Structures are given as C-alpha cells and as structure tokens.
Image (spheres, helix red, strand yellow):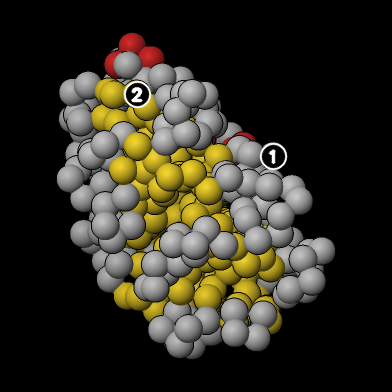
Amino acid sequence: MFFRTTMRFLLSVAALCLCSIPAFAKQQASQSEVNFSEGASDLPIRFENITLEDGLSQSTVYSIAQDRKGFMWFGTQIGLNRYDGHKIEQFMPDPFDSTSVHDDWIWSITEDKDGMLWLTYEDGTVSRFDPSTGKARNYYASESDSTTVAAFRSTFLSIDSKGQIWISGNGLQRLDPESGKVERWGTNTGNGGSIGWTSGILEEEDGTYIVVGRDGVQRFDPTTSTFKLLYDVPSGGTLPTRDPKNPNIIWHGSLDDGIYRFDTSTGEFRAYDVTQSDNNMSLQARPDPVTPGIVWVASEEGIVRLNAETGAYQSYRSGTGSSSRGGELLNNSIGR
C-alpha cells in the first residue's frame, strides 16, 4: 500500500516546489485552522494539471524530477515522459533494443552529477538513462545472483558523494555503476541484520548514512554493516530530504504520524500534525527553497504550507470553484 500511495503526492509537490507553471485560481486556508501569520491566510498558490490531453503517456505518475536544463521528467505506469513546458516527449521500452527504457513502470528518477538520469522499475531493475541520446544502460535484477540488483520493487534511489547508487525498497542496496556489482543489507541477506522496507537514505559527512523506513530513522555505517536506531516512527518513516538552508536538518514524512524534523547535529526531532482528521498520512515534506522556515507537505487533506517554528499551517484543497483545467488540485488526498 505504501509504495502505491506516492503517485499524486509526487506530481503535486514537485510541480509546486520545482516549477512556476502559471494558473489562475487562489485557494484559501480553512477558517477552522490556526492562522498561519497575519495577512497570510489567502496566500495564492498556482497549480496547473498536466494530463493525457497534454501528451502524458499515462495518468498514474509515480515520480517527477527536474534536470539541470529545466526539463521535467515524469515516470508513469506506461513509460518515461519529458516535458519542456509546452509539449511532452515519451520514451518507451523496446523489447528489441537493450538500450531502451527497461520497463513501462518507473518508480523513481534521480539525476547524477553528469546529467544522467537513474530510473528504478517495478521488477527491481535500475537504468542509467542518457537524456541526450535517449539510450540507457540497464542493470538487470536477478533472483538467483546476489551480486546484482535484487528482483523486488526498487522504489527510491539516491547517489552519494562517491557516485555510488543507493537503492531503497525491501532492505537497502548499494550499486557500483562501473562494475554493476551490488551489495545488499537487510533481512535474509546475511549482511546487516533484519532491516525492513526502506524509503530513502541520505549521506552524512562522517561517512555514515541516515536511513528512513519501516523501522523508523536509523544511522547506518556501511563499514561495519550496522544500524543504530535514532528514533522510532510508529507507522513507518517515508521519503527523507535535506533542508537546503541547513544541511543538518532532515525532513521526512510517515504513513500515519505526520511529518518530522530531525537535527542530525543534536539528535533532536520534532513531529508535526498537519491534518485535522484522524488520518495523518503525510508522505513527504519539502523545505521551501527560497523562504527559510516554510515547509510544503503532501497530506491526506491537500497540499499543506507549514510554519516550522510555530507549527501553524494552511491547507490548499480541491473543490474551491476553480476550473477543471487548472488552478486547483485534482484530489485532496495527495499520495493516495
């Protein structure tokens, strides 16, 4: 359930945080919510919905990335899409071409320092995709070879300072992009204990890594293959991201416990409840890249704008009377 719930969240938050696509409607915070700040209750948010009519290959979007040239990339259940603000180009798997996109179902997209895109798929395979040529090097998943990518859903991917590829999903994997060899940690691997599903990993300056997933937030040391629990997240932690204004701060979501702010320098963390209902699923929090202290959240009650200092927030929802072609969210449940 968790992995399938990321679709609408990723589409909405990435479009909100990474783009400035013009739209027309202004949405207001509910009167029952805490005032965000004086005069800010009607902060305009601009949304535009990108649909099949615009050339999207499929309406279920699991991943979004913006590359260094400004192109938007969408991973769907039917192929990879590149959007230049006007038109969409599709990249599809070709069974007769081993350098094509491997599969229809694309879970994540991450750009490396060379401008290559790393893609993960439903069957566990990982690709290094060259946007300039449309060609990919595929690292195929195997059930029998423990030195290759494991044959289970590779949901999230990150790249460390050495260019090593870290794959989250059922446990944790590290891929050497040159040799194609993989090292695995997790249940039944004989290498690192019984860590369950993971949803993201972030590198620390001391060579350790912060891992977020089913077992809460842990510090992982690959030199000793050990995991140390930093704090528990009862429902499971999701999708960590580092604050661009303060690299010591990590934000992450959860399946039913709101969002969390973790200070790696002090070990202190704070949980925020950003919904008014009993369902507090908030899969990801993204710090505003321009305004310090503002965090954008994907929740069960729409897109949330959070004041990290006070905990006050505003929600932006569908159903505000905007036109169906733009201006509002398609659904209040962002991530369902």
Viewer-closest of 74 and 128: 128
Q: At 32% across and 75% down in the image, what residue appears? A: 246
Q: Residue 90 bears which disc, if any?
A: 2
Q: Is residue 36 above or below residue 261?
A: above
The image position of residue 34, as x and y in percent, is 43, 53
> Looking at the rendering, in which quadrant would you find the N terminus?
top right
Q: At 73% across and 66% down in the image, what residue appears? A: 186
- As helix, strand or loop, the secondary structure at mark 2 comes to strand
- Residue 295 lies in quadrant: bottom left
Q: Is residue 187 above or below residue 313?
A: below
Identity, as a three-letter code, of the amino acid under mark 2? Gln
Viewer-closest of 167 and 280: 167
The image position of residue 192, as x and y in percent, is 73, 75
Q: Residues within 10 Å of mark 2 (few under 14, many from 20)?
A: some
The image position of residue 97, as x and y in percent, is 45, 28
Identity, as a three-letter code, of the amino acid under mark 1? Met
Q: Give how far apart the Cα atoms at labels 1 and 2 are.
A: 28 Å
Q: Is residue 259 above or below residue 185?
A: above
The residue tagged 1 is 1
Viewer-closest of 286 and 65: 65
Say left or right for 145 vs 167: right
- As helix, strand or loop, the secondary structure at mark 1 comes to loop
Q: Are marks 1 and 2 in contact (CB under 8 Å)?
A: no
The image position of residue 309, as x and y in percent, is 38, 69
Q: Residues within 10 Å of mark 1 (few under 14, many from 20)?
A: few
- Residue 235 lies in quadrant: bottom right
Q: Which residue reaches farthest top?
A: 53
In the rendered image, is residue 320 in sight?
Answer: no
Q: At 65% across and 86% down in the image, what residue appears? A: 224
